[in-house]
Amino acid sequence: MKIFGKGLLGAMSLAVVAIIGAVAFTGSGIYNVGADAPHWPVTHTVLQTLRDRSIAVRSRGESVPDLNDPQAILKGAGQYAAMCTGCHRAPGAQDSELRRGLYPQPPDLSRQQIEPRAAFWIIKHGIKMSAMPAWGSTHDDATIWSMVAFLQKLPSMTPEQYKAIVAKAPPDDDMDMDPKAMGNAGNRKG
């Protein structure tokens, strides 16, 4: 029993020292939170693992609708052009000023495919401390799934195909269309 008591006391002492150390580290300001200074490798690994596991666990139960519905893909194209290209790029587009200044760097969705359940969850709930907003507070699930449907097609699109589908996308009065992000598509009449 004495060994157990000493072990417990030792563990509690270690926990107190760890807490004091964490508080001292946090209060010291030694960690640079500037977006122009990358994380320490261990910090990057921990945050990336935390993010990936959190998304995987929370998106597991999502029921994926038909992502090949042409109308959903078309609607998603307009949504993506209006809300996403500044950070996640369009086919053939260069980095925007906004994207160049972000850390962590957002994925280039014109070249990278995201698993549908994860994409839905990320778009709906956002990601803390990453500049990824929670679009679920302003968009319904059907609209978010339309963006996911479009994202499944985006990496295989040429710049010309992208501009063509965005030009055909239905107008959405609630969206603030950025003509620069969409080529001439923002000048269409609805």
Image (spheres, rainbow, N blue to C red):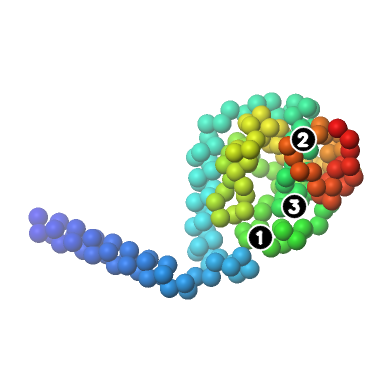
Q: Which residue is mark 1?
A: 102
Q: Who's the residue at 89% across and 42% down the image?
A: 187
State the separation of the CA atoms marked 2 and 1.
29 Å
State the separation of the CA atoms marked 3 and 1.
11 Å
As shown in the figure, which amino acid type bears the numbered disc 1?
A: Leu
**Could you say where residue 28 lies in the image, as x and y percent from the top left?**
43, 73
Earlier-in-chain disc, 2 versus 3: 3
Earlier-in-chain disc, 2 versus 1: 1
Left or right side of 24 for 119: right
Q: Who's the residue at 52% across and 59% down the image?
A: 45
Q: Who's the residue at 35% across and 69% down the image?
A: 21
Q: Residues within 10 Å of mark 3 (few under 14, many from 20)?
A: many
As shown in the figure, which amino acid type bears the numbered disc 3?
A: Gly
State the separation of the CA atoms marked 2 and 3.
20 Å
Badge 1 element: loop
Badge 3 element: helix
Earlier-in-chain disc, 3 versus 1: 3
Q: Which residue is mark 3?
A: 86
Q: Is residue 13 above or below residue 124?
A: below
Q: Which residue is mark 2?
A: 173
